[in-house]
Image (spheres, helix red, strand yellow):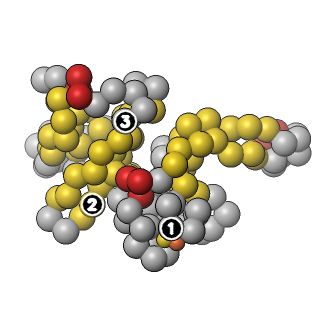
Amino acid sequence: MSDSKTSRKIAVAPVDEFPAGARMEVKVGNVNIAVFNVRGEYFGIFGICPHQSAPLSRGRLQGTVICNADTNWEKEWAHDGEVLVCPGHAMEYDLRTGKAFGYGMKLRTYEVVVEDDWVTVIL
Ligand code: FES
């Protein structure tokens, strides 16, 4: 949740121009934010891969296989359409959390809302 007294809002696009499956990039100062519409749900994530600066707005979206105590150590397809693959060297990021799969790093994520028919990033 954002704090409307202190948050800053960045309009990305009219909602009817940002359909499911689309992605866009907005630049706020010198920060790039990649914004995705996954099945009608919007996600915002820091847009530059910290490895070698590839633009994450151009990354492929997919799922991933998980295998852990939660899955009883059985392989299970998870996060379908919410795993962002860096177009540089294929590091995978969870769009919901910003966490890199298999690495101890996390990208900043941003709340994205529809306000007055505009897709809007909350900073
Ligand atoms: S630039 Fe993203 S993994 Fe290398």
Q: Which mark is residue 32?
A: 2
**SS of the residue under disc 1:** loop
**Mark 1 vs mark 3: which is more N-terminal?**
3
Residue extending furthest toward the right? 73
Q: Which mark is residue 88?
A: 1
Asked whether the viewer can see residue 8, the reply is yes
What is the crowding at mark 2: few (fewer than 14 residues within 10 Å), some, or many (at least 20)? some
Residue 122 sits in which quadrant? top left
Alpha carbon separation for disc pair 2 and 3: 17 Å
Label 2 CB sits under 8 Å from any ligand 1 atom: no
Alpha carbon separation for disc pair 1 and 3: 20 Å
Alpha carbon separation for disc pair 2 and 1: 16 Å
> Which residue shows up at 30% across the image and 38% down it?
112
Q: Amino acid at mark 2?
A: Asn
Q: Amino acid at mark 1?
A: Gly
**Percent position (x, y) of residue 41?**
40, 29
Residue sitting nearer the eye, 59 or 116 = 59
What is the crowding at mark 3: few (fewer than 14 residues within 10 Å), some, or many (at least 20)? some
Are the residues at dot 2 and dot 3 in contact (C-beta closer than 8 Å)? no
> Which residue shows up at 24% across the image and 64% down it?
31
**SS of the residue under disc 3:** loop
> Which residue shows up at 35% across the image and 41% down it?
23
Which residue has dot 3 on it?
Answer: 22
**Percent position (x, y) of residue 98?**
48, 54
Q: Nearer the viewer, mark 2 or mark 1?
A: 1
Instruction: From this view, report whether residue 7 is shown above or below residue 16.
Output: below
Label 1 CB sits under 8 Å from any ligand 1 atom: yes
As drawn, is 57 to the left or to the right of 11?
right
**Mark 2 vs mark 1: which is more N-terminal?**
2
What is the crowding at mark 1: few (fewer than 14 residues within 10 Å), some, or many (at least 20)? some
**Percent position (x, y) of residue 53?**
40, 73
**Percent position (x, y) of residue 80?**
61, 35
